[in-house]
Image (spheres, rainbow, N blue to C red):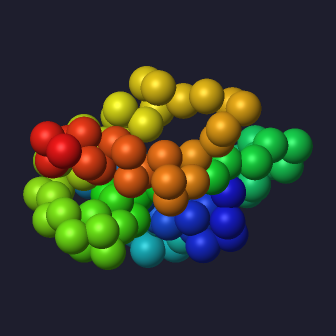
Amino acid sequence: MYGFMKEELAQTITNELESEGVASEQEDKEALRQIILESVEDYFDDKIADIWTTEDVRERGEEIGIRLSEEEAKQVLSRVLEKFDAGIGICWEVLDVHIREAAGQ
């Protein structure tokens, strides 16, 4: 997982915990974010994660002439995960297949 994604994940979790009242002071929030970030970094120390987003799917759809809604892009990602083949992986061509399926082509 890229560093900026780890940062985004830590921030998202921190914001959610703050909304639940776990961290109310700015210092507490920053300390909590740092603990979460360190935990995420430790977790991914011996792993990799390739993240694909609905933005990736929608942009690729536009490139091949297919406009997808956010919900359709989520369905494409779900289908990609459901049909994942480690021998092929996830690449633009795999996304193309699932985008075209979502569009009924």
Above or below residue 65? Residue 105 is above
- Name the residue furthest right: 46
**The N terminus lies in which quarter of the figure?**
bottom right
Q: Which quadrant holds residue 6?
A: bottom right
- Name the residue furthest top: 82
Q: Residue at x 50, y 59 (%)?
A: 92
Q: Which quadrant holds residue 38?
A: bottom right
* Apparent side of residue 13 relative to residue 69 in the rendered image (left or right): right
* Apparent side of residue 91 relative to residue 35 in the rendered image (left or right): left
User: What percent of the width, then of the height, locates residue 85?
Assistant: 61, 28
**The C terminus lies in which quarter of the figure?**
top left
Q: Which quadrant holds residue 34?
A: bottom right
* Apparent side of residue 4 relative to residue 64 in the rendered image (left or right): right
Residue 23 in sight from this viewpoint: no
> In the image shown, does 104 or 70 lie closer to the viewer?
104
Residue 65 in sight from this viewpoint: yes
